[in-house]
Image (cartoon, grey):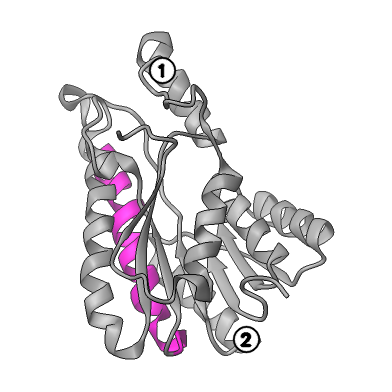
């Protein structure tokens, strides 16, 4: 028996990075998993790979969380196939380094649409499928806790997510639905590789942890499994920080 055996779970942005590792861990722990991403070939490959690796029930759905019609289509698939959603991991998002003087309207809109608007409506539109006692995991970041030069817009979106967790935990508590923010530190993912490349050697040197390494996506996924499982039954409205001490 896995920690989340028999639960129905959705991981948005689940075709790469932390989302992919979370989808894989959820499947290994016995969940029926839905994962989303924008690129059909990547979504299909991720679902096939996890199925081959775990033997689990994995469904990939192509979509964009910042597009409300796309979210409606996603939840229609889950409603038809499973009829409920026990665990929601709102992970999809984007971010790239850009200094204050270089912030453009397009950068601001894209980052907030992906990370804030997309997350708000991902959770709102899931509510009819969430049974009492469900778990909602919002992917934030330690960037939303401490300042980071060149990452102010991204960091602001992640700070917003932490407040969503607190506010929604109170709103949904009467139904026993737990809402928590998962706050990773620097993690080795394709997205982080792109950020490090843009920062250059000097900027990248500042992204480190007391352990002298970046985190592994599997280490963050382990936190998501905990938040999805009954082991976290008395935890809601909190930050689960997994950052290797980067924010000490």
Residue 182, placed above or below residue 57: above
Q: Does the magenta stretch include residue 107?
A: yes
- Mark 2 and mark 1 in contact (Cβ < 8 Å)? no
Q: Is residue 148 magenta?
A: no
Q: Which residue is rendered at x = 54% and y = 87% of the image?
A: 84
| Quadrant containing the C terminus in the rendered view | top left
Instruction: Indicate left or right for 35 with 142 as reference.
Output: right
Which residue position is annotated with label 2? 82
Q: Which residue is rendered at x = 65% and y = 85% of the image?
A: 81
| Quadrant containing the N terminus in the rendered view | bottom right
Q: Which residue is rendered at x = 33% and y = 70% of the image?
A: 236
Of residues 137 and 237, the one drawn nearer to the viewer in this rendering: 237
Q: Quadrant of residue 130?
A: bottom left
Mark 1 or mark 2, whichever is nearer to me? 1
Q: How far apart are marks 1 and 2 (CA)?
A: 44 Å
Q: Quadrant of residue 133?
A: bottom left
Of residues 129 and 24, the one drawn nearer to the viewer in this rendering: 24
> Can residue 51 be seen from the camera position used here?
yes
Instruction: Indicate left or right for 133 with 73 as reference.
Output: left
Most common secondary structure along the magenta stretch: helix
Of residues 88 and 241, the one drawn nearer to the viewer in this rendering: 241
Q: Which residue is rendered at x = 41% and y = 38% of the image?
A: 185
Q: In which quarter of the image is residue 127?
A: bottom left
The numbered mark, 1 or 2, whose residue comes first in the sequence reads 2
Magenta range:
106-131
Position in image of residue 94 (x %, y %)? 40, 44
Check disc 1: other Cα within 10 Å, few if <14, some if 14-19, many if 20+: some
Which residue position is annotated with label 1? 204
Position in image of residue 54 (x %, y %)? 79, 61
Position in image of residue 86 (x %, y %)? 52, 80
């Amino acid at each position: 028996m896995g920690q989340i055996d028999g639960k129905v779970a959705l991981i948005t942005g689940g075709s790469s990075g932390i989302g992919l590792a979370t989808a894989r861990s959820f499947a290994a722990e016995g969940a029926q998993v839905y994962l989303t991403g924008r690129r059909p070939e990547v979504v299909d490959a991720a679902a096939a790979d996890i199925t081959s690796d775990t033997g689990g029930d994995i469904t990939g759905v192509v979509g964009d969380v910042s597009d409300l019609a796309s979210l409606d289509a996603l939840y229609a698939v889950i409603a038809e196939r499973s009829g409920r959603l026990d665990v929601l991991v709102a992970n999809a998002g984007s971010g790239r380094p850009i200094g204050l003087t270089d912030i453009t309207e397009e950068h601001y809109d894209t980052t907030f649409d992906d990370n804030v608007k997309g997350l708000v409506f991902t959770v709102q539109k899931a509510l009819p499928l969430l049974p009492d006692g469900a778990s909602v995991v919002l992917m934030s970041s330690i960037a939303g806790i401490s300042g980071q030069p060149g990452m102010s817009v991204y960091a602001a979106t992640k700070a917003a997510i932490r407040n969503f967790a607190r506010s929604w935990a109170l709103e949904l508590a009467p139904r026993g639905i737990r809402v928590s923010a998962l706050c990773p530190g620097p993690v080795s993912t394709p997205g982080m590789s792109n950020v490090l490349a843009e920062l250059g050697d000097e900027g990248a040197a500042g992204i480190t942890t007391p352990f002298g390494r970046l985190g592994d996506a599997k280490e963050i996924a382990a936190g998501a499994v905990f938040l999805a499982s009954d082991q976290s039954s008395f935890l809601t409205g909190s930050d689960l920080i997994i950052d290797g001490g980067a924010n000490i």
